[in-house]
Amino acid sequence: MKIAVFPGSFDPITLGHQNIVERALPLFDKIIVAIGQNISKKHHFNIEQRTEFIKKTFNNNPKVEVATYTGLTIHFCTSVNANYLLRGIRNGADYTYENSIAQMNKAMNENIETLFIPTIPELSAINSTIVRDIINNGGDASKFVPTAIKDKFI
């Protein structure tokens, strides 16, 4: 079974995240959207809200699961028998950062491959940090998040 882990904070999940998962679905039997828990990081949405948002976004797709984890992503992959890490790439800076992580992960576990999927141009400016900033400053972030959760952002 081909299992991929798509890790992130998903604070909140965006249209970009959704698009990466949907485009990767034909490649895998299962994609686990894995919310990494970092207690030193301040999140806008709690872990329960982020989990709910992801479940609502993919509620019609049995190939997508949601999980939370702490510690190294590579250890989580091993614990769920995933041999693939899925990462979205918006630009060259993302590639440089993600490539370094992919190389370190490969050095820690040679059985796990990282696949980069480039963001489609119309979604390349969207990221969770900017969406949170819009929300925190009273803006309308609904056009940057999946349809299934837009009511949470209006």
Image (cartoon, grey):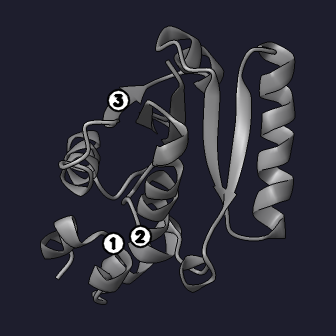
Q: Residue 100 carries which label?
A: none
The quadrant in which the C terminus is found is bottom left
Quarter of the image for residue 141 reads: bottom left
* Quadrant in the rendering for residue 85: top right
Amino acid at circle 3:
Ala
Query: Which residue is labeled 2 in the image?
Result: 15
Work out which residue is located at the far left of the displayed protein and give it: 151
Where residue 90 appears, as percent x and y from the top left, is: 68, 69
Going from N to C along the chain, the mark reached first, 1 or 2, is 2
Q: Residues within 10 Å of mark 2 (few under 14, many from 20)?
A: many
**Residue in the foreground of this view, choosing between 145 and 46:** 145
**Element at label 1:** loop
**110 left or right of 11 in image:** right
Q: Residue 30, how many percent across, how many down?
A: 42, 31
Q: Earlier in the sequence, mark 1 or mark 3?
A: 3
User: Residue under circle 3?
Assistant: 67
